[in-house]
Image: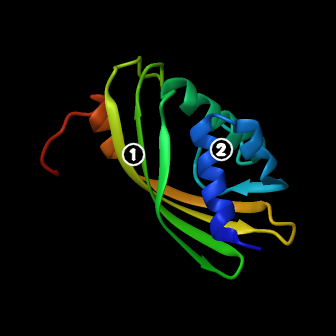
Amino acid sequence: MDHAAAMRRIYELINSGDIDGFGALLADDFVEHEDLPGLSPDRDGVMAFFRMLRAAFPDMQMNPDDVLVDGDKAVARATTTGTQQGEFMGIPATGRRIDVQLIDIMRFGADGRVAEHWGVFDALGMMQQLGAIPDGPPA
Protein backbone atom coordinates (compact mmCIF):
# COMPACT_ATOMS: atom_id res chain seq x y z
CA MET A 1 0.00 0.00 0.00
CA ASP A 2 1.17 3.51 -0.81
CA HIS A 3 0.66 5.37 2.47
CA ALA A 4 2.13 8.60 1.08
CA ALA A 5 -0.49 8.63 -1.70
CA ALA A 6 -3.23 7.82 0.82
CA MET A 7 -2.15 10.70 3.02
CA ARG A 8 -2.10 13.11 0.08
CA ARG A 9 -5.59 11.86 -0.90
CA ILE A 10 -6.84 12.68 2.60
CA TYR A 11 -5.69 16.29 2.21
CA GLU A 12 -7.29 16.48 -1.26
CA LEU A 13 -10.65 15.32 0.11
CA ILE A 14 -10.54 17.80 3.00
CA ASN A 15 -9.49 20.60 0.62
CA SER A 16 -12.45 19.87 -1.66
CA GLY A 17 -14.86 19.80 1.29
CA ASP A 18 -15.60 16.07 0.91
CA ILE A 19 -15.62 15.28 4.62
CA ASP A 20 -17.67 12.10 4.10
CA GLY A 21 -15.07 10.87 1.59
CA PHE A 22 -12.34 11.71 4.11
CA GLY A 23 -14.24 9.83 6.82
CA ALA A 24 -14.46 6.73 4.62
CA LEU A 25 -10.64 6.54 4.76
CA LEU A 26 -10.71 6.30 8.57
CA ALA A 27 -11.08 2.89 10.25
CA ASP A 28 -14.29 2.13 12.13
CA ASP A 29 -12.27 2.02 15.37
CA PHE A 30 -10.13 5.07 14.46
CA VAL A 31 -8.43 6.80 17.42
CA GLU A 32 -7.58 10.52 17.46
CA HIS A 33 -4.68 11.36 19.79
CA GLU A 34 -4.72 15.13 19.12
CA ASP A 35 -6.87 17.02 21.63
CA LEU A 36 -10.10 18.24 20.01
CA PRO A 37 -11.85 20.23 22.78
CA GLY A 38 -15.49 19.24 23.11
CA LEU A 39 -15.27 16.48 20.50
CA SER A 40 -14.88 12.73 20.83
CA PRO A 41 -11.47 11.22 19.92
CA ASP A 42 -12.92 9.02 17.19
CA ARG A 43 -13.95 9.16 13.54
CA ASP A 44 -17.16 11.08 14.29
CA GLY A 45 -15.30 13.68 16.38
CA VAL A 46 -12.66 14.23 13.69
CA MET A 47 -15.28 14.56 10.97
CA ALA A 48 -17.19 17.09 13.12
CA PHE A 49 -13.94 19.03 13.62
CA PHE A 50 -13.26 19.25 9.88
CA ARG A 51 -16.87 20.25 9.16
CA MET A 52 -16.43 23.05 11.72
CA LEU A 53 -13.12 24.09 10.12
CA ARG A 54 -14.58 24.11 6.61
CA ALA A 55 -17.57 26.19 7.80
CA ALA A 56 -15.25 28.76 9.40
CA PHE A 57 -12.62 28.66 6.62
CA PRO A 58 -14.49 27.65 3.43
CA ASP A 59 -11.40 28.28 1.29
CA MET A 60 -9.13 26.27 3.60
CA GLN A 61 -6.33 24.36 1.92
CA MET A 62 -4.05 21.85 3.63
CA ASN A 63 -0.99 21.34 1.45
CA PRO A 64 1.54 18.66 2.35
CA ASP A 65 5.05 20.07 1.97
CA ASP A 66 6.73 16.77 2.87
CA VAL A 67 5.38 13.24 3.32
CA LEU A 68 7.59 10.55 4.83
CA VAL A 69 6.65 6.90 5.29
CA ASP A 70 8.07 4.30 7.68
CA GLY A 71 6.29 0.98 7.88
CA ASP A 72 2.61 1.49 8.68
CA LYS A 73 3.03 5.20 9.52
CA ALA A 74 3.12 8.31 7.34
CA VAL A 75 4.21 11.75 8.54
CA ALA A 76 3.42 15.01 6.78
CA ARG A 77 4.67 18.54 7.32
CA ALA A 78 1.89 20.66 5.90
CA THR A 79 0.80 24.26 5.48
CA THR A 80 -2.79 25.25 6.14
CA THR A 81 -4.18 28.45 4.68
CA GLY A 82 -7.62 29.98 4.61
CA THR A 83 -9.80 33.00 5.30
CA GLN A 84 -12.00 33.02 8.39
CA GLN A 85 -15.50 33.67 7.09
CA GLY A 86 -17.45 32.00 9.91
CA GLU A 87 -17.26 31.48 13.65
CA PHE A 88 -14.38 29.32 14.83
CA MET A 89 -14.16 28.13 18.44
CA GLY A 90 -16.10 31.15 19.69
CA ILE A 91 -14.21 33.65 17.52
CA PRO A 92 -16.59 35.53 15.21
CA ALA A 93 -15.66 35.77 11.53
CA THR A 94 -12.73 38.15 11.13
CA GLY A 95 -12.13 38.04 7.36
CA ARG A 96 -8.45 37.43 8.19
CA ARG A 97 -6.23 34.89 6.46
CA ILE A 98 -4.29 32.23 8.27
CA ASP A 99 -1.09 30.54 7.17
CA VAL A 100 0.03 27.95 9.73
CA GLN A 101 2.28 24.91 9.83
CA LEU A 102 1.25 21.49 11.10
CA ILE A 103 2.60 17.98 11.49
CA ASP A 104 0.35 14.94 10.99
CA ILE A 105 1.28 11.36 11.84
CA MET A 106 -1.08 8.64 10.64
CA ARG A 107 -0.89 4.92 11.31
CA PHE A 108 -2.53 2.80 8.66
CA GLY A 109 -4.22 -0.52 9.34
CA ALA A 110 -3.89 -3.65 7.21
CA ASP A 111 -7.02 -2.56 5.28
CA GLY A 112 -5.26 0.66 4.19
CA ARG A 113 -7.49 2.94 6.26
CA VAL A 114 -6.16 5.29 8.94
CA ALA A 115 -6.29 3.62 12.36
CA GLU A 116 -4.68 6.38 14.45
CA HIS A 117 -3.68 10.04 14.14
CA TRP A 118 -1.35 12.27 16.13
CA GLY A 119 -0.94 15.91 15.22
CA VAL A 120 0.43 19.27 16.24
CA PHE A 121 -0.19 22.68 14.70
CA ASP A 122 0.75 26.27 15.37
CA ALA A 123 -2.37 27.18 17.37
CA LEU A 124 -0.72 30.29 18.85
CA GLY A 125 0.23 31.56 15.42
CA MET A 126 -3.28 30.94 14.12
CA MET A 127 -4.89 32.77 17.06
CA GLN A 128 -2.49 35.69 16.57
CA GLN A 129 -3.28 35.82 12.85
CA LEU A 130 -7.00 35.88 13.70
CA GLY A 131 -6.43 38.71 16.21
CA ALA A 132 -7.69 36.62 19.15
CA ILE A 133 -4.27 36.83 20.85
CA PRO A 134 -2.08 39.91 20.44
CA ASP A 135 1.27 39.64 18.70
CA GLY A 136 4.16 40.39 20.94
CA PRO A 137 7.51 39.32 22.22
CA PRO A 138 7.70 36.04 24.11
CA ALA A 139 7.21 36.35 27.85
Q: Earlier in the sequence, mark 1 or mark 2?
A: 2
On the image, the x and y values in percent for residue 8 come to: 60, 58
On the image, the x and y values in percent for residue 133 come to: 27, 33
Residue beneath label 1, please?
123
Could you tell me if the residues under marks 1 and 2 are in contact, i.e. CB atoms within 8 Å?
Answer: no
Determine whether, in the image, residue 55 is placed left or right of residue 44. left
- Give the structural element (helix, strand or loop) at label 2: helix
On the image, the x and y values in percent for residue 49 come to: 62, 36
> Which quarter of the figure is the N terminus placed in?
bottom right
55 in relation to 17, above or below: above
On the question of residue 89 being in view, the answer is no
On the question of residue 47 being in view, the answer is yes
Q: Residue at x 47, y 22 (%)?
A: 90
Q: Residue at x 61, y 47 (%)?
A: 12
The numbered mark at residue 13 is 2
The residue furthest bottom is 71
- Give the structural element (helix, strand or loop) at label 1: helix
